[in-house]
Image (cartoon, coloured by chain):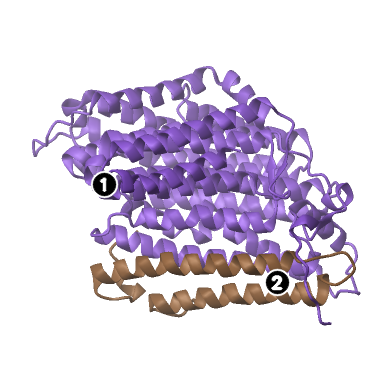
Chain colours: A purple, B brown
Amino acid sequence: MPEIWLVLGMCAVILVPFLKRTSVALPTGAALAALFFALAATTYTLVGDSGGTAVLGTLTIDPFSQFVKLIVILFAILVIAQWIITTRGQTAAGDTPDFLCLLLGAALGMSLMSSASNLLMIFVAMESASYPSYALAGFRKRHRIGTEGSLKYVVFGSAASAIMVYGMSLVYGMTGTLNLSDIASQIAGLSHTSSAVTGTTPALAAIGLLLIFAGVAFKLSAVPMHFWCPDVFQGAPFEVTTFLSVASKGAAVALLVRLLFTLGAASPVNSGLFTGVGVGVAILGAATATWGNLVALHQTNIKRLLAYSSISHAGYMIMACSLIALAPNTATAHTAITAVLFYLVVYMFMNLGAFTVGAAIAAQQNTEDIREYAGMSKRSPILAALMTVFLLSLFGMPGLGGFMGKVFLMQAMSDAGPAGFVLIAVLLINTLLSLAYYVKPAYYMYFTADKESRPTIFPSPAALLMLFVCAAALFWTGLLANKANSFAGAHAVLMQPANAAAAAPTLINGLPTVAVPIVDRHD
Amino acid sequence: MLTKRNAIGILIGVELVLNAAAVNFVAFNHYVWGGADGHGIGGLVFAMFIIVLAAAEAAIALAIILNFYNNFSSVDVERADQMKG
């Protein structure tokens, strides 16, 4: 349970100012120590495989959830490192503990999202990932753009979560349980016979499920609910943008995978309802990827450009997730989950690299406009070359991790019959579209003369080291992809949900009897 | 929730939807899934969590709205139009 270490870390970071006011090293050290302990706890449970449940059966601990937690916690460490290297100077020393506490809290919520298997836990996990994110997005209090971004985030986010909870209440009303696998088997039964006794109807359950998916789609910034993403990313400080772009979306993808996997596990083969869910998710993913790429074409702010790029990357992953519902309980589903995990790892490194270069340039040249990158290849050749590597990997250049990520996605899709070929076509067209905007910063850096004699950017040695590590990771995943992919494949295993009602008769409404106090009923 | 331009009004709308969900949970628990037939209090527990998290959400949202007011001298969400595209 790495989450325990995150909670302890939050407490430690909050208490540090009582010992030593305005210390930066102390809270940073405490936060990093907590994250490293959490990382060790995660890798420890990775070895001890099998899978099980925790916290009254509301959390499922399986190789898949542990892998996602590994990504989230490792990424939190990398983001803190990025913050120390590039933008720490802009954070007041007195704000450091608050910043770190919020970051740890968000990481905690995202870890829980990856293993939540109960509506109540999904709700709690998503909210505990969201609230710190709202605050982090508006962390620069005197920054007008940042304030605006955080207002939009909290307004859209709370509306989306309220809608999601309403959907959960409908699902609970129709199925009588909060446990995901019980809900799945109940809904599979509902679609055959409408229960006259309780007056439950499949239609209401379907609406409830739709609203739950809408809440997850908000976290994924899938297309009808993506408006917050570019504004929040532009307004937030670089380290927060980096964190949200990977960890928040990764956790939401993990939740989507678990929802689809658990729903699919209970469905009879070729069940109409779940095929419908799969087609819906596939359309959502295709629309998200295409819309993100089209709008990215005319962006000039590096953060907005990468925000729309992250929307389209989320779209690619959603497209792969749809295979889990289209072909439940098959090898195709496993290949798709493997591909998504591999993609997340690659996406983590390329986004971290691109944002770190952006942050280094913004710290010294004070600009986020890619047109201001003119002549960067003359001024800072190493930085320009590294940025080009990250952008080409985001595009999917052969030899880099991003290419192999897309290859594995397509491989999974090709197993899924005609629907898969439509998805492959969408993915290929989108990849071509995305080239047009990924080369834009590189174009300004290499082929535009610097007429205003802008300053040379000297990244610190630590920043360079971090960027080289990211680039090396991309080359490694690009050239030796099979090794990384088999590692991901070994962890693309979700625990087959035991039917909780059958396995443990003590489970009541998805919560065990031990949690039930005596309720005085007067009916 | 959807038609308000005042940020506080939107927040009130969100709280109303959350409370609607909580009432749903309690009602479904009481009239459909409660009782002696072996179901339990899942819906009631969920309603408690909604109340707690709604309070936390209101705290965060009000802090952000206050900060917005400090920067824009207004809580009208139409004023949040610095970023476009």
Q: Marks 1 and 2: same chain? A: no
Q: Is residue B40 left or right of residue A111?
A: right
Q: Residue furthest front?
A: A19
Q: Which mark is residue B25?
A: 2
In the image, residue A402 above or below residue A261? above
User: Around disc 2, counting alpha carbons within 10 Å, would you say few (fewer than 14), some (14 to 19), or many (20 or more)?
Assistant: many
Of A340 and B12, nearer the camera is: B12
Q: Give x and y (percent) for residue B32.
A: 82, 74
In the image, residue B71 above or below residue A65? below
Q: Give x and y (percent) for residue B81.
A: 31, 67
Disc 1/disc 2 C-alpha distance (Å) = 46 Å
Query: Mark 1 falls within which chain?
Result: A
Of A375 and A485, nearer the camera is: A485
Q: Residue at x 51, y 23 (%)?
A: A477
- Provide the residue designation for mark 1: A21
Q: Is residue A247 left or right of residue A181?
A: left
In the image, residue A319 above or below residue A193? above
Q: Which mark is residue A446?
A: none
Q: Give x and y (percent) for residue A305.
A: 36, 46
Q: Is residue A246 left or right of residue A414?
A: left
